[in-house]
Image (cartoon, coloured by chain):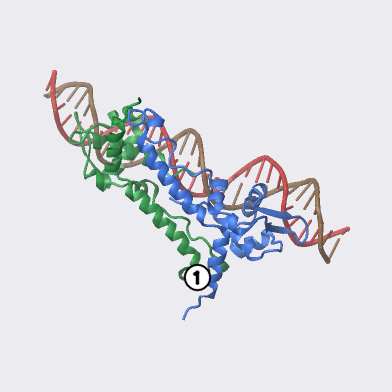
Chain colours: A blue, B green, C red, D brown
Amino acid sequence: MKVLTKKTDYAIRALVMLGAQKGSYVSAKAIASEQDMPYPFLRGVLQEMIRHDLIVSKEGVQGGFMLAKDPDEIGVRQLIEIFQGTVQISECMFRKQICANRSRCVLRHEIMRIEQVVHHEFEQITIGKLLRKLHAGENLRPA
Amino acid sequence: MKVLTKKTDYAIRALVMLGAQKGSYVSAKAIASEQDMPYPFLRGVLQEMIRHDLIVSKEGVQGGFMLAKDPDEIGVRQLIEIFQGTVQISECMFRKQICANRSRCVLRHEIMRIEQVVHHEFEQITIGKLLRKLHAGENLRPA
DNA sequence: TTAATTGATATCAATATAGTATCAGTTATA
DNA sequence: TATAACTGATACTATATTGATATCAATTAA
């Protein structure tokens, strides 16, 4: 069971790269080669992020992409929702006898509680947080 | 993004049913009709659970399935691992420049921490817990 | 003018998930 | 002891999702 698909994975890494080069446009080609992603696939991911106002683009020579908002305001949860749809445990577990009436289904509460926990955890990880951790990591040298 | 697939969903519901009828064999046919699951599909799910010693079976007339262990010892996490494979966030996020060396990758820690949280949450939900919640729920009547 | 770029969109391939079909073997019971 | 109700094993098909490619028009710095 893989929680993050390639699209979400590539999106996160692309955003981290854009965050690291704040203020200048970075081309899809540069991201793809540096991060070892299939170029046309990444293109699609980037366009999707434009549609969701996470990044902006500039066409033509010297063009590329740039973050559209503060890295701390881009959470992994949002990226998952964009590329993988809303996180849901299952459609409606426990039907029929066990759960004849949705509103009375006590088991549903348990499931929803976990959804909240998962949402919360993913929401906490932002591009900004990853950038800071990355930076701290770069300072760590093997002894 | 659906966290539980049909197989895991059906497995949980079948186990809850077996737990509710402790001590007697329940046939796949009975489970399928009561829980509205495709019969041959459920058969496969049940056989997989036999292989993992979660349930035992009895062939022939009056045969069926029965829990092989205490309901409190069967957790949803284990079921997810059986039917959906080990929960992992992504293969190895952040490769190349951003994560040239796996052991030094600080971002990886963040991801692994969430994996732990998710594992822990799913581990907490056992068939026994669901049975108790179900029972409490049945006592709740609309006013 | 041209090469480097993105915008838009159609299509394909690979994999995972969901579901079906078949037949042999076992067993309670009439 | 025949038979119907069962599971065991396994091969197969269908559908959905994920991953990836291809193409061409529009834009822009140099």
Q: How many marks?
A: 1
Question: Residue drawn 30% across and 45% down?
Answer: B126
Percent position of residue A112, x then y: 42, 42
A103 versus A9 height, above or below: above
The residue furthest bottom is A143
At x 34% / y 33%, what residue is drawn?
B40
Q: Nearer the viewer, residue B48 or B131?
A: B131
At label 1, counting other C-alpha atoms closer than 10 Å, the crowd grade (few under 14, some 14-19, many 20 or more) is: few
From the viewer's perspective, is A2 left or right of A45? left
Estimate the x, y position of residue B91 in percent, counting from the top left. 47, 58
Camera-side residue of A97 and D23? A97
The residue marked by circle 1 belongs to what chain? B
Residue at 27% x, 34% y is B135
Q: Secondary structure at mark 1?
A: loop
Residue on which disc 1 sits: B101
Amino acid type indicated by mark 1: Asn
Q: Residue B133: horizontal and vertical position, in percent?
A: 30, 38
